[in-house]
Image (spheres, rainbow, N blue to C red):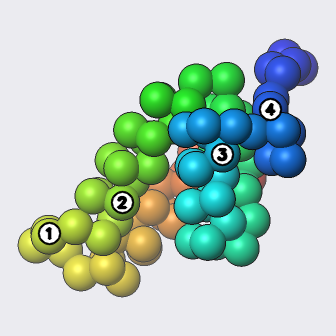
Amino acid sequence: MPWIRQTAVGDATGLLKRLFDQAIERAGRVWHIVHIMSVNPPAMRDSVRLYTTVMKGESPLSRVQRELLATAVSAELECRY
């Protein structure tokens, strides 16, 4: 299994600290899928923006439909998260 060194939440500074703070405000914690991106804070920022646009932005699909699609795809791909 590969090992990627992650920045501890308490050690974060600058952009990474702001992103971790936002994650905690949003979800009550920093989920692993977000934390692994601590090696590249600009990529984390952009990934969260994309996710927010896809899941919460204007769309012909309802929020429930989008969540159901995400769940079905994750189940089909055997994702654990």
**Circle 1 — which element?**
loop
Disc on res. 44: none
Quick check: 54 left or right of 51?
Answer: left
How far is disc 3 from disc 1 in space, using C-alphas?
Answer: 31 Å
**Circle 2 — which element?**
helix
Q: Do the residues labelled 1 and 2 touch (CB within 8 Å)?
A: no
Label 2 vs label 4, nearer the camera? 4
Amino acid at the residue labelled 3? Lys
How far is disc 2 from disc 3 in space, using C-alphas?
Answer: 19 Å
Amino acid at the residue labelled 1? Ser
Q: Mark 3 points at which residue?
A: 17
Is residue 64 visible from the viewing direction of this image?
Answer: yes
Amino acid at the residue labelled 2? Thr
Sequence-earlier tag: 2 or 3: 3
Compared to 44, does 9 lie above or below? below
Compared to 25, does 36 lie above or below? above
Disc on res. 7: 4
Q: Name the residue under label 1.
A: 59
Q: Where is residue 42 in the image (x, y as percent from the top left)?
A: 46, 29
